[in-house]
Image (cartoon, rainbow, N blue to C red):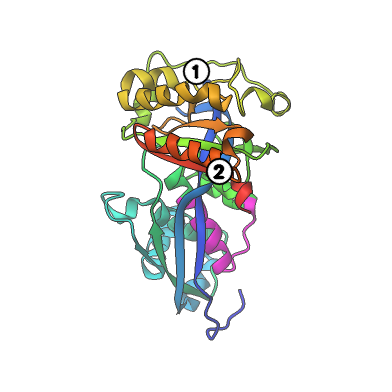
């Protein structure tokens, strides 16, 4: 990082996008208690917004001298120093009622993890800029859209840029995986086939798509779902090549063997999700598509074909407005992220 306390970075605003899972399989349980999965992540052009306002520079010369000695010191020292730096460098706004403590917010956790990594890599600069991060929350919590994970990923990407840390996307993805299984896909920044716990990512090219997405008010306990006795945990793994070649089986339609293993369980546990899915299933003949859950949360969606999603046609716009208006819960028309780029 170049030392120049006269440079003030301009405010930065970034979309923190939602994701959907076009299908979701569990292929086995790991020794560490996590589950291996296979899915195709699709990023959307809709989500939260994060605003980064850089302010004063903080001189870290005394702290940066630790870079030469931290290698042999305990990780707890790195964490303690990172906690102090995080409190000094970052102010978080717009997160009331998201977590009981601000320290539990994934934006703060991502910042601490990044600073800890900087210290452990002996790359602590001689100065860093303070920043106020404001969250403009749009995504409902617990919907399976990846809101908190996306916030963490966006924080890592922007602070890496703002503080000129020069960590690679691969390094940030590895760091993000320590915060949550969905964080790496948002750092990856494009549609992908995911394996492992979601951190093994292979890019995939999919056709542009619009979706009718519903977010019923239902709290889905993820731990309860993963522990459910009826959950299928031994779906036969498919190669990334096969998943790529068979994209027609899970984009518009949802043909065997592709499905979401959580759907039958959630439908038994959450009547609001069942109602939302039933509404979308009634629209399937017109959309020429199959409705489904995304992830293990409460959100459900229906892919829209070109005839129902072409926004240049007035009749189609009226049809979509009607579908949104008649939905049993909050509904949105969203697009894949590429359409907004």
Magenta residue check for 165: yes
Point out residue 222 in the picture as x, y percentages from the top left corner: 38, 30
Residue bounds of the magenta highlight:
151-169
Judged left or right of residue 87, residue 260 is right
Along the line of sight, which residue is nearer the eye, 56 or 96? 96
Along the line of sight, which residue is nearer the eye, 329 or 265? 329
Looking at the rendered image, the quarter that the C terminus falls into is bottom right
Tell me the residue that label 1 is attached to.
Answer: 233
Tell me the residue that label 2 is attached to.
Answer: 314
Residue, x 48% and y 15% (percent of image)?
Answer: 232
Q: What SS does tag 2 mark?
A: helix
Residue, x 46% and y 66% (percent of image)?
Answer: 52
Residue at the bottom extreme of this rendering: 6
Which of label 2 and label 1 is nearer to you?
A: 2
Is 55 above or below relative to 111? below
Q: Is residue 108 visible?
A: yes
First in residue order: circle 2 vs circle 1: 1
Q: What SS does tag 1 mark?
A: loop
Residue, x 68% and y 37% (percent of image)?
Answer: 207
Q: Residue 100 shows which numbered tag?
A: none
Magenta residue check for 156: yes
Predominant SS of the magenta segment? helix
Residue, x 52% and y 73% (percent of image)?
Answer: 65
Q: Can residue 71 be seen in this view?
A: no
Is 271 above or below relative to 229? below
Along the line of sight, which residue is nearer the eye, 182 or 77? 182
Query: Could you say which quadrant of the image residue 195 lies in?
Result: top right
Is 190 above or below relative to 224? below
């Amino acid at each position: 990082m170049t030392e120049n306390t006269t440079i003030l970075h301009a405010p930065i605003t970034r979309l923190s996008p939602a994701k959907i899972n076009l299908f979701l399989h569990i292929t086995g349980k790991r020794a560490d208690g996590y589950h291996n999965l296979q899915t195709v992540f699709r990023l959307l052009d809709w989500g939260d917004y994060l605003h980064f306002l850089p302010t004063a520079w903080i001189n870290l010369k005394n702290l940066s001298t630790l870079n030469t000695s931290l290698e042999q010191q305990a990780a707890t020292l790195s964490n303690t120093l990172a906690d102090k730096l995080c409190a000094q460098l970052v102010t978080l706004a717009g997160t009331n009622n998201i977590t009981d403590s601000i320290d539990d917010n994934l934006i703060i956790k991502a910042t601490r993890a990044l600073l800890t990594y900087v210290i452990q890599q002996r790359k602590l600069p001689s100065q860093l800029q303070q920043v106020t991060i404001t969250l403009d929350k749009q995504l409902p919590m617990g919907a399976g859209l990846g809101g908190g994970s996306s916030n963490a990923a966006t924080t890592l990407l922007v602070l890496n840029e703002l503080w000129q840390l020069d960590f690679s996307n691969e390094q940030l993805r590895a760091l993000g995986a320590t915060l949550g299984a969905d964080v790496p896909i948002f750092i990856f920044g494009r549609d992908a086939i995911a394996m492992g716990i979601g951190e093994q990512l292979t890019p995939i090219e999919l056709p542009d798509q619009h979706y009718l997405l519903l977010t019923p008010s239902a709290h889905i306990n993820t731990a309860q779902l993963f522990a459910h006795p009826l959950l299928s945990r031994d779906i036969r793994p498919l190669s990334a090549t096969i998943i790529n070649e068979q994209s027609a089986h899970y984009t518009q339609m949802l043909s065997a063997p592709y499905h979401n293993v959580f759907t039958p369980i959630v439908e038994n546990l959450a009547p609001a999700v069942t109602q939302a899915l039933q509404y979308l299933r009634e629209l399937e003949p017109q959309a020429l598509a199959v409705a489904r859950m995304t992830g293990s949360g409460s959100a459900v969606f229906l892919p829209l074909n070109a005839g129902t999603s072409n926004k240049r046609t007035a009749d189609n716009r009226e049809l979509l407005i009607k579908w949104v208006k008649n939905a049993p819960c909050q509904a949105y028309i969203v697009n894949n992220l590429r359409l907004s780029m």
